[in-house]
Amino acid sequence: MVDFRRVITALAVLALFVGLASAQVNNGTGGTQLTCATNVTVTPALRGEGFTEQTGDITISCTGGALPTYNSSIPLVNFTIFYNTTVTSRLLPPSTGQSVSNASEALLLIDEPQSGLGGFGPSLNQVLCTTPATGCAAFAGFPTTPNPSQNGGTAISPVLGAVTAVGGTTPAPNVYQGVVNGNSVTFFGVPVMPPTTTGSRVFRITNVRVNAQPLAGGSASGASPVQASISISGATSLSISNSAPNVGYVSLGLSTGVSTTNQPMSQCNSQTKQAIDVLTFSENFGTAFKTRIAAQSDTAYAGQQGTTPLAPTAGNQNTPGGIYNSESNFVYPLTGTSAGFSGQVAGLADFGTRLKATFNNIPAGTHIFVSTSNVSNAITPILKPPVGSGTIGGSTGNGNNSSAAYVGYAALVSSETAPDGFASGGGFLPGVAASDNSATGSVPIAEVTIANGTGTAVWEVLNTNPNTLESLKFGVYITYAANVAQNSPAPGVSTVNLSFAPTATSGVASSSLPIPRFIGDSSAGKTILTINQCRTVLLYPYLTNQAGFDTGVTVANTTMDPFATPAQAGSCTFNWYGGTTAAPTTPPAAYNTGNIAAGATFANTLQTIAPGFQGYMIAVCNFQLAHGFAFISDVGARNLAMGYLAVVLDDPGNTGSRSSKNTNVTTAENGGH
């Protein structure tokens, strides 16, 4: 919803210097020097991650000068605005009749047409100059009645304005496309008709987007300015004060985090839609999250529609000076068949702010799901506000208000670049419907497509309030079938990178790349999942095959039981610590038992597997429930014998073992048997 208080304030400020009163016919004599001053009504915060951030509108208000003679040609001027970073406004060149290829959505408006302000200029319709490379000729004339021919050659206080031809009555174009060239945008051939002493002539420069990333380092105050510098050339000169205004301040717009809810996990145990993480996207300033347009009604997808009804209806998104807090700026359809624009729309973003999670190193056989909208926590979804609740935009639009019904809301979309609707008066979201619910049955979820261990999930902001700092959270859930024999899912660490979306690498103006677009998350991925190998660690504190003694060593694989434990099979590796009679300080090489099937027991003697050894041994067994036994005796067990159970050790950092740290199996042992 448009913040009408800010709009009214902005327009009131404009009214102080936009005195667009009627000018009368004269013979071109008299008048004062034409002087101009710049103003940036709103200096917005720009996201340092963004390639296509909106700058504040520049208004150039001119007073004085000599009114041109009736039917005389109005001097044409080129306005060039240089920025301290690259201009990235969408390129919208005419498809026919023009050779210019870098005409853009950046626009210059003369005298605030259809703004709702008083005076002649604001009362005119918005009319596009369809030749952006050269501008449009204009003449001093009478676009309103009466004119001299209607009163015997004597004018009765007609308004002298810009017309398209000598003796004509068609108002000259008052909307000009900017031509982008690197760090600058130029508006060619703009008529500058002095207002003399009767008021002001206002030139508004809007829809200029810039690459904010080079300025994202910030300054001591935490934000870097986007600076503009205005240059004038052409048939006449203008004296401009404050010709280098700041049009925005850049700082990083997003902070992210991951809170684990069930970490780490064991390869031994199957999982079904189990919550593992909550991803958090937090805006660093109140307007970092935006909808595609400012919703105008409490109807479905009101914040995603393609074009809005034209001005001067209050709040519509092509009212000069309007403040919308949306990804789109001044939305203006470039109509005109002869110009070949074929439905291009200046100022219209492709979608609202999108938030992306990129999952990395997801093991084969593991299925990742995410919540289809934001949540309070892993088991509690945020309920979408119903349409008709009084929140502008309802469940599928945006609510830029602080009513009790307001709730920040975002929904899963099919891809980071799929556009929202383009139909006039309506819209749609390329949303993804929930395919299931989380393990608790409370959170609607959908599966993320994983290819070669990588997948992405993208949500679009639908409800946001520019007057608050919002955090949107999304649940992550996992499903896999334990298959220890096949080492599936493979042990390892999975990570996620969190960023705005879509991500791109281009910081130049384009006719095909989406708006908005952002740099990806270049930091190290945040851990979201650790799958530990299914194993047990056994300590045999004393073994000997010296001085006439020998030791029998056994390992039982007890994963076959009456308690529905998944049957597992794997080998054990015996690691020796001590020495042999031949080398008292050098232990033998590690010994591998080979595969021990579920329900089977390995048994052998030290004489066979580590002859002459004396010391202790740690066995690492690649299945969950291993139990060990050692039996020491003299040869033949005639005089002395003893036996003991191997000690089950904690497996540091690996909860797949039977450890007191283990939260994923029901049996936990610490120094047990």
Image (cartoon, rainbow, N blue to C red):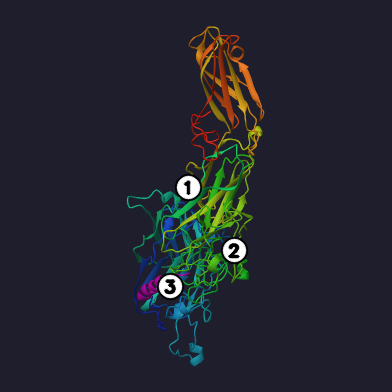
Residue at the outermost front position: 639
- Foreground pick, 78 / 81: 81
Secondary structure of the residue carrying numbered label 2: loop
Q: Disc 2 marks which residue?
A: 94
- Foreground pick, 104 / 325: 325
Q: Position of residue 214 (x, y in %)?
A: 43, 49
Mark nearer the N terminus (1 vs 2): 2
Q: Position of residue 231 (x, y in %)?
A: 40, 61
Q: Disc 3 marks which residue?
A: 4
Does the magenta run of residues contain 656?
Answer: no
Question: Looking at numbered disc 2 in the image, what kind of residue is underneath it?
Answer: Pro
- Foreground pick, 55 / 425: 425
Q: Position of residue 392 (x, y in %)?
A: 50, 70
Whether residue 367 is situated above or below residue 673 in the rendered picture: below
Count residues near mark 1 (Cα–Cα under 10 Å), then give few for <14, some for 14-19, many for 20+: some
Q: Position of residue 142 (x, y in %)?
A: 48, 83
